[in-house]
Image (cartoon, rainbow, N blue to C red):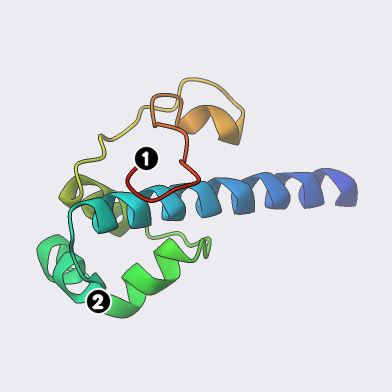
Amino acid sequence: MTTKQTRTKDSQEQRLAERFGALVRQRREALKLRQDDLALAANVGRRFIVELEAGKPNCQLGKALAVAAAVGLKAFKPVESSPDALLPDLPELKDEPGA
């Protein structure tokens, strides 16, 4: 893989992590949960929630899926090679809270 391909892949992964984290945060806030409450419900640490919502890419997919399930986001099945294709059924983010 070339350096340019690696940067593109890293950039796509970062955007995916940021989108996923934003969706988790949006759902948590809609459910009126604090980060501590969500961490307890998903059996993870609060720091993990903070970093996940901030879009920090990590390799702890099991924990991320547990958090997603705790806020009612359904698991996904990767069927395409594009990282953006991993979350095809998740709603787009709204600009306004509660919209």
Quick check: 12 above or below 37?
A: above
Mark 2, secondary structure of its residue? loop
Please name the amino acid that badge 2 sits on: Gly
Q: Nearer the viewer, residue 79 or 30?
A: 30
Whether residue 21 sits left or right of residue 74 in the image: it is: right
Please name the amino acid that badge 1 sits on: Ala
N-terminal of the two: label 1 or label 2? 2
Whether residue 45 sits left or right of residue 22 in the image: it is: left
Residue at the left extreme, as displayed: 41
Whether residue 8 sits left or right of residue 55 in the image: it is: right
Q: Residues within 10 Å of mark 1 (few under 14, many from 20)?
A: few
Q: Is residue 2 visible?
A: no
Whether residue 97 sits left or right of residue 7 in the image: it is: left
Q: Nearer the viewer, residue 61 or 16?
A: 16
Mark 1, secondary structure of its residue? loop
Image position, residue 87 (x, y; %): 45, 32
Quick check: 42 above or below 3?
A: below
**1 vs 2, front mark:** 1
Assign the N terminus to one quadrant of the image: top right
The reply to whether discs 1 and 2 touch (Cβ–Cβ < 8 Å) is: no
To which residue does mark 2 refer?
45
- Residue at (53%, 60%) from the top-left corner? 57
Q: Is residue 23 visible?
A: yes
- Residue at (18%, 64%) from the top-left corner? 33
To which residue does mark 1 refer?
99
Query: What is the quadrant of residue 67 in the picture?
Result: bottom left
Counting every numbered tag in the picture gives: 2
Q: Residues within 10 Å of mark 2 (few under 14, many from 20)?
A: some
Res 67 label:
none
